Image: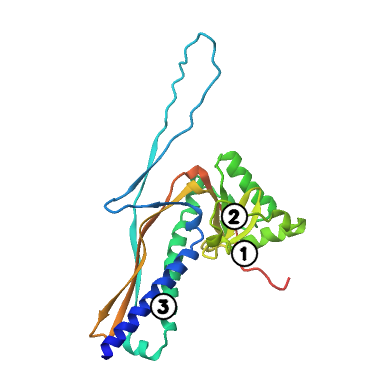
Amino acid sequence: MAQTATTGNLEAAQNIIVAKCRYTAEFNSPCVNLIEKFTLGKGAKSITVPKVGQMTVSALTDGIDIVAEQDIGLEYTELTTSEVGGRIVLTDKLMRQFNEDVFKIVGKQLGDAMARKRDTDVIALFSGLNGGTAYGADDKYMSMVNASACVANLKGGNKAPDPIVAVHHPHALSYLVRSAGAIGSTYYMGILGDYTAELLRNYWKINLDGCNFFQDGNIAAIAGSDSGYGAIFSKGAMAFVESKAPNVERERDASLRAWEVVIVADYGCFELDDNYGAAMRYEVASIATNA
């Protein structure tokens, strides 16, 4: 009877763990929700994403044949996935001495870990965008002037298509909001547009020149520096491909008198178009609160 009761309680707790984990992983990965998403179907090893180049047309002369032949300029990017996971062991004694809230805690911890991993995998792509040439520089702040220049360069110089977004550390965006406030920050408040407001509203900060700026605390300072790499990019600059969404399973270990809870996902993050994005290097150090 005791084993049956324990098993029954864990069955109910399993639903709590899964629900909390999925919720946390979905809502705590802002960068994943800003780029292209693909799903790797059952039985497939990879996804081939084609990209075509630009063609040119020119003025014609009546009676003269068109001799300039255009090239499609077709290129391919192969997207595949790899497994990511973790586990936690819950002993019978632990479950006896804790109430149901322990399963909510475990679910949130697993979900936070998976969300952070997915998010930082996207962030790791930032420094390679735009051929590795970053906007901004070390010891520079994200002012209105600098942020506006980033938007103009990506749209004008790189000809990146809309929608364009920017992501950076909350400390970096604090300087942007401060400089906007001097002019009247309400002028720069916008809407999320095509992006899912439910998933991203807590990360959205400001709209400047048609570009939504989002904050992400997972962006870290570069080693030996107080600056870090955020990025400005079109949605098609990077891709997140998923073969298996985060999934939680449990397994009984009788000799250990415990249950093992495992979370596993199968995904990959890739750069699709180098010209459609650029890293933004600005200061991310802590900001004085007594200025």
Q: Quadrant of residue 18?
A: bottom left
Q: Which residue is mark 2?
A: 192
Numbered badge on residue 106 = 3
Where is the C terminus found, in terms of image quarters?
A: bottom right
Q: Position of residue 165 (x, y in %)?
A: 57, 51
Callout 3 amino acid: Val
- SS of the residue under disc 1: helix
- Name the residue type under label 2: Leu
Q: Earlier in the sequence, mark 2 or mark 1?
A: 1
Residue beneath the point at 43% across and 70% down = 111
Label 3, label 1: how far apart the Cα atoms are: 30 Å
Q: Dividing the image into 4 quarters, which one contains the N terminus?
A: bottom left
SS label for mark 3: helix
The residue at which mark 1 appears reads as 171
Q: Residue 47 got which mark?
A: none
Q: Residue at x 45, y 74 (%)?
A: 108
The x and y percentages for residue 220 are: 52, 64
Q: Residue drawn at (51%, 64%), measured in percent from left and top?
A: 218
Q: CA distance from mark 2 to mark 1?
A: 21 Å
For this orientation, the residue located farthest to the left is 255
Residue displayed at 47% across by 61% down: 119
Instruction: Rate crowding at label 2 as few (under 14), some (14 to 19) or many (20 or more) other CA atoms within 10 Å.
Output: some
- Spatial CA span between label 3 and label 2: 32 Å
Would you call the spot at circle 3 few (<14 residues within 10 Å), some (14-19), or many (20 or more)? some
Relative image position of residue 44 (x, y in whole percent): 29, 50
Mark in the foreground, 3 or 1? 3
Give the residue type that dot 1 points to. Answer: His
Q: Give the quarter of the image for residue 230.
A: bottom right
Q: Which secondary structure, mark 2?
A: loop
Residue 114 visible in the snapshot: yes
